[in-house]
Amino acid sequence: MNVLVLNCGSSSLKAAIIDDVTGERRGRVRVERIGEPEAALFDADGPAVPCAAKDHGEALAAALPVLERARGGAPIDGVGHRVVHGGARFSQPTRVDESVLEAIAALTPLAPLHNPANLAGIIAALRAFPDVPHVAVFDTAFHATLPPRARSYAIDLELAKKHGVRRYGFHGTSHAFVAARAAAFLGAKPGDLRLISCHLGNGASVCAIEFGRSVETSMGMTPLEGLVMGTRSGDIDVGAALHVARAEGLDLDGLDALLNKKSGLAGLSGVGNDMRDIEDRAAAGDERARLAIHVFCHRVRKYIGAYAAVLGAVDAILFTGGIGQNSAVVRHKIAHNLQLFGATLDEDENRSARASAARPVIRISTDTSRTHLLAVATDEEHAIAGETAKLVARRDEVAQRSIPIAVSARHIHLRKETVEQLFGPGHELTPLKELSQPGQFACEEVLEIVGPKRSIAGVRVLGPVRPADQVEVSRTDEFFLGLDAPVRDSGDVRGTPGVTLVGPKGSVTLKEGVICARRHIHMAPEDAARFGVADGDVVEVAVDSSGRDLTFGDVLVRVSPKYRLEMHVDTDEANAAELVPKHAGLLELTQGTATPLRRVLR
């Protein structure tokens, strides 16, 4: 498809027509200094041309003839819009409608410099292309999977909820894109890897990606938190900021300007925010420039260490963004001492590595390095084009269906060897009653789970036996037992905590196996075909419970001929949502915030 991708800043507009598959540009233009007498239009990388653009509508009108000539009459199949902040509401790309426009406007307090400009660009494009599907792609969406412990700030909880104060994260489109590129380069799927993605540019952030899902990220409620950036301070003691404000007589706007526009590399170096200039000055002996580089790299390395601890192990560390892809000096300094995680930099490869469209992924680690170090070219415009095309392709595929919901209480799956250790040699599990999924049954056998703090007796074993032992508990159970069990797909017990199981004939201490099961839908291939989804897709499902419209996000689709259509949620979520067995979820593949399901299209 030919997708028009728009990225609107407060005084700029970038537009490109992109082939969603190849990423080929069939026209590229930008307008700078919108609303100023010096407004200028740039055709690709050509020279500036004066452009009378008072607002984003006039800027787009000036840009369209340039794009028309470049695409040679080929149709525009969809328009993709970069939107910086989607808040808690938008967890994936979404078809634009009136409710989406209202929601983006309502999120302005969370991104006052970005969302109004993004919204202005969308409105201008809707007027220019009223009959073409428009899709909003949110920087924050990829981080919707952050667990509560990662997204919550330690302030008054009610105050935080009232004002939407939590970590949202940004650069999500880039982090997801380079994770997929890196996985393909390594011959794996993103869902098989634990990655640390370092997007280093004028804006910079680090993301911990566990098996395809963002579980930690350095930017917070706004893009100010985290790494040192071009003009942003990144992490700073709030008390220090208040001290400077009081000492200098700064009001809130003055403090905002100091931290967002006069800090970071620019504030440290005194020569601006371009790392290339800072490196040149550092090489010439400028101590401030050297300090800026050292602080920048130290902060990144510190986050990498923290995120390695969060993930438990790291398969690859990715460097992307303008600095990450191109600065051998920065990569060298960041990679120093990463041998602790089995990551060893190949200095020769690093010196020459410049990730680009021609060579999008370059390995810069040694052959013996256990953790790969990769320079990866990001392309957020291509990613937006791809997400837009996939939604557009489904714009006429309306498939609203009811999915039965089952509440999954705590339970245990056992290997045959473990059954015999707990219940005696030769013991076979005794079916008590059949479960909804064919071939599965609740057993008469029950066990006691013994955790570090407490134990839970009478926990049901489910049959038949499995290849690996697994204990599925709720969040309440997790805290009661004294565990830190991750949310995982059933069967994925790598790096999870263990417990002791006590049976009538013995006990077994598991080294791993305790999880909080991820929300999931079982369906047969014919159901998947009917809904237009595939095994491994991630969806949202809406439920009308007690008169409330609730949406369960991050629901994994599992497809097998042996499955019967059913969505599983754990006891805590069912209680919170006031669900009972009669409830069902609605699935609909036309995108838009008013629809019950929005698929995360890859």
Image: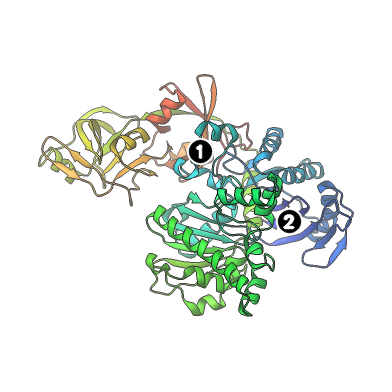
Q: Residue at x 83, y 46 (%)?
A: 57
- Secondary structure found at label 1: loop
**490 relative position to 66: left or right:** left
Q: Residue at x 62, y 64 (%)?
A: 268
On the question of residue 218 being in view, the answer is yes
- Secondary structure found at label 2: strand
Mark 1 or mark 2, whichever is nearer to me: 1
Q: Earlier in the sequence, mark 1 or mark 2?
A: 2
**67 relative position to 220: left or right:** right
What coloring was used for the rendering?
A: rainbow
Counting labels gives: 2
In the image, residue 16 lies at what x, y percent? 74, 57
533 or 124, nearer to the observer: 124
Amino acid type shown at disc 2: Ile
From the image, tell me which residue sits under label 1.
Answer: 155
543 or 339, nearer to the observer: 339
Residue most extreme to the front: 247
From the image, tell me which residue sits under label 2.
Answer: 17
In the image, residue 549 lies at what x, y percent? 55, 25
Numbered badge on residue 393: none
Query: Residue 377 sits in which quadrant?
Result: bottom right
Check disc 2: other Cα within 10 Å, few if <14, some if 14-19, many if 20+.
Answer: many
Q: Residue at x 37, y 39 (%)?
A: 517
Spatial CA span between label 1 and label 2: 44 Å
Q: Is residue 601 above or below residue 204?
A: above
In the image, residue 261 lies at what x, y percent? 69, 56
On the question of residue 601 being in view, the answer is no
Q: Is residue 310 above or below residue 431?
A: below
In the image, residue 411 lies at what x, y percent? 28, 34
Amino acid type shown at disc 1: Ile
Check disc 1: other Cα within 10 Å, few if <14, some if 14-19, many if 20+.
Answer: few
Query: Residue 65 sits in which quadrant?
Result: bottom right
